Amino acid sequence: MSMRSISLNVNGVVKDISVSEDTVLLDALRDHLGLTGAKRGCGKGECGACTVLVDNLPVMSCIYPAIKAEGRSIVTIEGIGDDRTIHPVQKQFIEKGAVQCGFCTPGLILSSKALLDRKPHPDEREIRVAISGNLCRCTGYTKVVEAIGAAASELRGQVVSSYRREPKTGSIGRSITRVDSLPKVTGKAVFTDDMSLPNMLFAGVLRSPYPSARINSIDCSGALSHPGVRAALTAKDIPGSNRFGIIVKDQPYLVEERVRFVGEPLAVVAAETRELVKEGLNKIRVDYTELPAVFVPEEAMKPNAPRVHDTGNILHHRKIRKGNIEEGFAKADIIIEKTFTSQTVEHAYIEPEAALAHMDHGQMIVYCCSQAPHYYRNEIASMLAFPINKVRIVRLATGGGFGAKIELTAQPYAALCSYFTGRPVKYVFTREESVITSTKRHAFNLHYKLGATKEGKLTAARVTIISNGGAYASYGPAVLTRSATMAIGPYECPHVHVDAYEVYTNYPIGGAMRGFGAPQMAPCHEAIMDEIGRRCGLSPIEVRRRNLLRPGSSTTTNQVLEHGIGALETLKQTSGRAWPGSDRGAI
Amino acid sequence: MKKRGRGIACTYFGMGNTAKANPSIAFIEVCEDGTAIVRCGASDIGQGSDTALRQIAAHTLGITPERVTMVSNDTMVAPEAGVTSASRQTYVSGNAIRLAAEQAKAVLLEEAAECLKYDPVDLEARDDRIFLKENQDAYVTIEDVCGRLRAKGILVAGTGTFTPPTPEALDPETGLGVPYGAYSYATQIAEVEVDTETGEVTVLSFTAAQDVGRAINPTAIEGQIEGGVGQGIGYALMEEVVVENGVILNPSFSDLLIPTALDVPYIHSIIVEIPEPTGPFGAKGTGEPPTCPTAAAIINAIYDAVGVHVTSTPVTAEKVYWAIKKKESEERRP
Amino acid sequence: MRWETYKVARSLEEAFGCLEQFQGKARVIAGGTDLVVQLSERGADSGMVLLDISSISDMRGVKIADGGKEIMVGAATTMAELAQSEIIAKYGRALALGASCMGAPQIRNVATIGGNVVNAQPAADGTIPLLALGAEARVVSAKAEKWIALEELFLDVGRSLVNPSEEIITHFRFKPSAETGSSSLQRLAKRKAFTLPTLLVAAMVRLDGGKQFFEEVRIAVGPVARTPWLAREAADGLRGSPVSQEAIEKAGAAAKLAAHPRDSLRGGAEYRKEMVEVLTKRAILECVTSLGVNV
């Protein structure tokens, strides 16, 4: 691949850089010009995190050839404004609270600015269309739209008020500006892939294409002899423990014998460039024997099902037995049964997992995105057989997590390679790798049977939850237990039976995801509540009002609640605002 | 034809890890100019914990939040504060920081009491001053106090640790017990429009009330509510990882759909404050609760609009369409 | 490696010179929003040369030509430009609609109508409206040029008559909708923006002077086959019919009968088949209503 010198006009300055013919504009900006504000969220022009302006038009720089950009004017977030010359769009993003993790923020700001340059007075729909190519996973877009509208007003010369009713003294209850907002709107916030160290290598992992298999042998010799490859490691190379897990340590960093899910790591390669990593991975020879697999939890629960783990496929069975269930149903005038299935869900944070590891004075330092730096520290110490105080985790700006960045992802592999090569090693997931390997929101199969009096008061609840845990435990048992406690929603019911099962399968791993079981169950119990209301002649508001927990109520686990119970108040305030005809006074 | 409907859903969510200790620890150092450094390893992943925790530290110490620096991201510097999950950081780390700040403040109050010639119990610290509760004009600045302490060779620091008051596991047979020290409650109302010929669902408006105990930073809390609802809308209508024989068929954003700005309406968030006695200044967590009832509210709204129950999520247009067709054919039968 | 060499041509002569020079190893790229992704995924054939023709000014822009008898669209015109063009809005409305909902703003600013057509997908947002509008493509090689009707252009998914190593589509042309003509596009997708379609139906109708009868009808649908598809029986059935609800419903039913979609991540086969009927009826109805006719 020949290199070519090109001239790019970026933020008003013309720079000559030497790139390969197939470099895309995003990499030219990030790797050659040090402008790391534009981000790689997917590499395929499907998320907008890489948005920059070319001749005043927003484009996806990750699929825009750098050579195509010659002769055009390019504007990146760094050219919009910095802390001394902040642009109204950046300012309003900060003021309106439109910045959370910050990874999509530069792209959003550039799309917004381009809109306002063309249309000084956009309506809400025009704003939303203009940013429809910028995926944001954190904000829900409401404050982003507000910020853009406010910036439009400011640019038209109007004064924008930021009135909030706030306490006059003290800090509690004040919507103070977040300290990390300014770096995020100016593109200065450092996410892991924005950082590089001298003499750095790149890492990549070879992953199983089979959901269930035995590994007979892994031959890394081809990779090791490939030019530019500096390490090709398998399970036997791990100095310490090859088991991790936030609750149950049942998961290997690198497979020894048994593969349990598609994408499970088998070997890790470190090489001089990302290309060479790919080439090295392709040279590893694995001898597999495919084994029977099971994907459906009900199948996996049967006695003759293929065993995902030797300990058996039912990882956990959580029971709740409150009161006397037969008595409860005997008291019911209405009994409703319902089954419900929920889907497997991806966290889809816009920043893919990333880690940069290096050894410094005998200490392993890992820069990474993370929701759990101390947990990472302890596990990596165990993996390397280091004392805990010889591992240091530095969490850089993290582009969303929602539960999946509690798990170890890129970090152990970067650390392992750095340990072996003695050089800094960076490992950044592609979007596909992120989706294939990260933990998921558990898919639940639910069966509910609720009983109520004709006054609409719950008397009995029997709930069965079958959770598809996937190949390893991750947060499964905790999600299960929490789900059991929340199974009937925020209502009082004297007799409750819950049987919740966490089941191993050869399916993507279920782990922590925002809501921990409640999102899956609420559609079922809330539909039943409405139905109970209908059969009793009660509105959806009233049937809930009669059952919601309040001081003195006992929960599904027989905990008596005393204070801090806002259920009725939230019902009153939402219905007062958004349910015409509801009687505020009744609540 | 387009039909509209309205649906409501309620959920609740326990704060902190279920029925087990999940502690946080925090260190506070007050410098000689009255500014402070908080060290607590609570990961800010965009939800704004660094800011809210700074506010808790500032309010407890009596200084303005701009005079507080928060260090949370380096395990060499910031001590363990558990995982950023279970909506626990405001509640657990917030309490740890408050306790650390109380410890540091006690030293400041002692010194201020000496200056003002009163007892520490007569004094209050706020907005960078320590003053007499009965007469705010009798005050000394915190900067002054710190300078005096420095001159005396006294360094001001505090340590705090907290774990929710639920250290015991639930009974393995009955599941009964106290899983959480506090709960957060949510009610949400969705208004939808269903295209009866295609099954497409549009969320026209959304209202979400979240009981947060006490709002430390209201804008940040609204951000969590709106973000949670946004994810909930995606979960309700379009999100799904499609797996066949263990293989994920849609690993890229072209077919792994999450909401765009055109899929989510303006979200009205309502902050409800009913103080949580065990939370810092009455506050509890908000990270997860807002995403729990969203899909349920939408599904109930769809029923209100077109009288059909879809019994699996995501509720795609295709599923709604077939449910409507099934209902129509059942209604035609005599 | 995505490609070996990237060349930019500023004129057609330069473009053909380059194609000839590289003897089949070069291929044309316009916006690249599809092609760059495809090449990144599969890796390039060794020695591949990309020839960027998006700067050839002759190939950009929308004009009323031939004394008002045709609309001429440069193949390197971006989808955003088409979406904003007053000429297209007035005379080729289905194309304006398709161009405005394809992809996302950032994609529309770079993707070209020529690239959209040559990518030869059965439900392309540019192709389906052009097909309904009865468009032709001007396919040029070093030695020859010819106008090809769009319905003859496609061979299979991802394959058209155009050989991107030797030929370039330079323009599209179609008849502007008349006083009594209109076109419409109906799009069904799993998300309200930035999503490939579950189903696309474009219709073009021309009524008689009195706006009582259908004189000309074209209905294009995708994806219901391996190539963009015309609902010929449905369109034939409408021609000559009085403008009425029954006629429109009949056309919808006929289109549904003849369409054979398959299952995919974007929709089930049976659902799509049902939607062919729904969207066909809506497309025709919208054309008719936009002409001020009530049914």
Image (cartoon, rainbow, N blue to C red):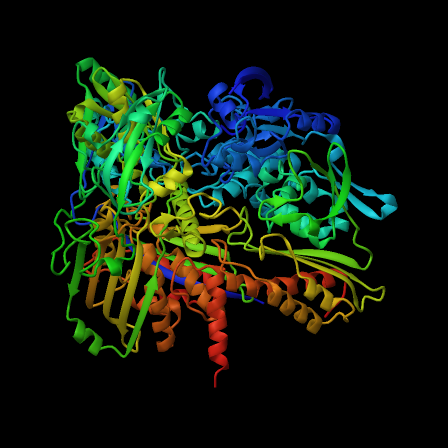
**Coordinates of residue B48 in the picture (x, y in percent):** 36, 37
Q: How many marks?
A: 0
Judge by depth and name the residue closer to the eye, B157 or C117: C117
Q: Quadrant of residue B130?
A: top left
Judge by depth and name the residue closer to the eye, A274 or A290: A290
Q: Is residue C46 left or right of residue B135?
A: right
Q: Is residue B272 left or right of residue C281?
A: left
> Most extreme residue toward the right, as rendered?
C67
The residue under the point 46% across, 55% down is B206
Instruction: Confirm whether residue B233 shows in the render.
Output: yes
Q: Is residue C28 left or right of residue A395?
A: right
Q: Is residue C118 above or below residue A504?
A: above
Q: Quadrant of the C terminus of chain C?
A: bottom right
**Coordinates of residue C59 in the picture (x, y in percent):** 74, 35
**Coordinates of residue C129 in the picture (x, y in percent):** 68, 51
**Coordinates of residue C149 in the picture (x, y in percent):** 73, 49
Judge by depth and name the residue closer to the eye, C225 or B119: C225
